[in-house]
Image (tube, grey):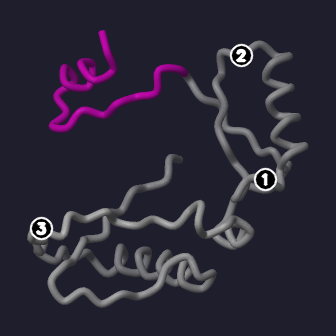
Amino acid sequence: MTNWNKSLRQGRDTPKVLPAIELLNIEPIPRDPGTTTRIGSQMNDTAREEVIQCLQCDIDIFAWTPQDKERIDPNVITHHLNIDPRVKPVKQRKMHFGPDKDKIIQAEIDKLRAVGHIEEMQFSEWLSNVILVPKPG
C-alpha cells in the first residue's frame, strides 16, 4: 500500500506523501546546525561513513546559506518565466497572512534581497502570492 493510500485511510483531507525510507539527520560540520542534511538510513555503516566523509571533504561546494550562493554564476541559477505573449495573464486575489507569518515572509525576503538574489519588480497586471513551506523538522 502506498503512503498516499495510508494517509487517505487515516482520515486526512489532503494526503501526506511520506519518504519511501527513513532518513537520518547529519551535520557534515559537527556542532553547526546550519549544515544539517539528510541521508538514507538503510546504508550499512561503511557506506554511511563514506557519504559523510565525502560531504565533509567537499563542504565548500554546497550552498548552506543565501550568502554561499554568491559564488554561483547567475546564468546557472537565474529563473526566467517563459510566458507566451499571446496568453492573457490572470491576476490572483491577494492572500492575507497573520502578523506572525508576515514577519517570517519579510525576514526571508530581506535575506534574499540583502545578498542580491531577488529584486523588487512592479507588475501592474500580474501578482503571484507567497506560499509558505515549512522546513522539515
Rendered image quadrant of residue 95 = bottom left
Q: Which residues are magenta?
A: 1-21
Three-letter amino acid code of the residue under disc 3: Arg
Three-letter amino acid code of the residue under disc 2: Met
Residue highlighted by disc 3? 86
Q: CA distance from mark 2 to mark 1?
A: 23 Å
Which mark's residue is nearer the viewer, 2 or 1? 1
Front residue (pair 83, 2)? 83
Residue highlighted by disc 2? 43
Q: In the rendering, at what x and y percent does residue 35 appear?
A: 73, 53
| Residue 61: mark in rendering | 1
SS at badge 3:
loop
Category of crowding for the residue at label 3, using alpha-carbon neighbours closer than 10 angstroms: few (below 14), some (14–19), many (at least 20): few
| Image side of residue 111 versus residue 60, left or right | left
Category of crowding for the residue at label 2, using alpha-carbon neighbours closer than 10 angstroms: few (below 14), some (14–19), many (at least 20): few
| Image side of residue 76 versus residue 1, left or right | right
Q: Earlier in the sequence, mark 2 or mark 1?
A: 2
Q: Earlier in the sequence, mark 1 or mark 3?
A: 1
Q: In the rendering, at what x and y percent does residue 11 appear?
A: 16, 28
Q: CA distance from mark 3 to mark 2?
A: 51 Å
Quarter placement of the N terminus: top left
